[in-house]
Image (cartoon, rainbow, N blue to C red):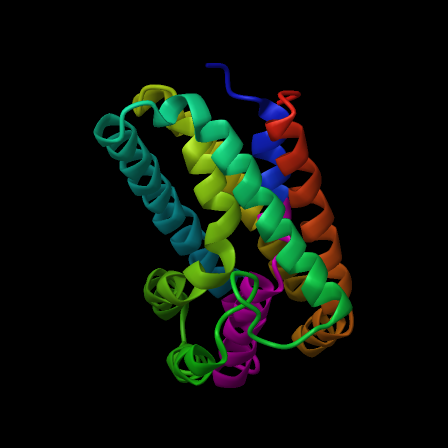
Amino acid sequence: MGIPLAAIIGYAAADAVNPCALAVLTLILIAILTNNPKNRKQVIYAGLSFIIAIYITYFFYGLVIIQLFKTAVDIIAGIRSYLYVILGAAAIILGALNIKDAIWYKPGGLMTEMPMRLRPKVKRLISTAASAKGALVIGIFVTIFLLPCTIGPYVITGGMLSSIELLQTIPWLLLYNLIFVSPMLAITLIVYGGMTGVENVSGWKDRNIRYLHFVAGVLILILGFLIILGFL
């Protein structure tokens, strides 16, 4: 079964505009600037360390997701024939949830944002970041808290990639996660370059959170229908 490049890029792009991941990055950068107000180099070091931690950790999460799908297919006879239909249906549901958040927004939406009960724990963890090394370590732990709001598109992608050998999935996962972290990389470079402040980035995210959910929702929804209809 061939892997549709458009679907992989589309799901990665939808994951990349997730407000959840952008919010965590801005909190990291604010913590670094608070602890090192006169050392702007720490912004680029800490931002890159955090992004590297996210990239590597999510890559391994991807391998686990794919292997779980492979195991499920081996255990449940005949599921492979219906896997794309199941993944397409899951994408439609996830897309609808994002669109719902765009219309009737409530923080901590199911499968679209970090649950409210986890946010104080994440803020306390992030506030301890004082260096690039600290950001790297925190980034690894924070990915656990990010999973509830970013895992949806990744699971669908993992299901699609489970149709090929595990080693063959590596380039796809590298591409997916490169797209996923690209907005975080852009924000880090923009803040480091002095083109805007972290507070402005955070404020922009808060003002446009409905639009971010709408863009992600429409993209995931369209891809879901295309998968079910056999165009991808």
At which x and y percent is residue 173?
Answer: 44, 34
Asked whether the viewer can see residue 185, the reply is yes
Q: Is residue 200 left or right of residue 72?
A: right
Q: Nearer the viewer, residue 215 or 40?
A: 215
| SS majority, magenta | helix
What's the residue at 55%, 72% (across, down)? 29
Q: Quadrant of residue 13?
A: top right
At which x and y percent is residue 215?
Answer: 74, 52
Q: Nearer the viewer, residue 131 or 214?
A: 214
At which x and y percent is residue 51?
Answer: 47, 55
What's the residue at 68%, 52% (across, down)? 217
Query: Is residue 27 within the magenta segment?
Result: yes
At which x and y percent is residue 73?
Answer: 29, 29
What's the residue at 56%, 78% (across, down)? 30
Asked whether the viewer can see residue 195, the reply is no
Which region shows up in magenta?
14-43
Query: Is residue 19 within the magenta segment?
Result: yes
Quarter of the image with the C terminus in it:
top right
Q: Quadrant of residue 155?
A: top left
* For residue 30, above or below residue 14: below
* For residue 171, above or below residue 197: above
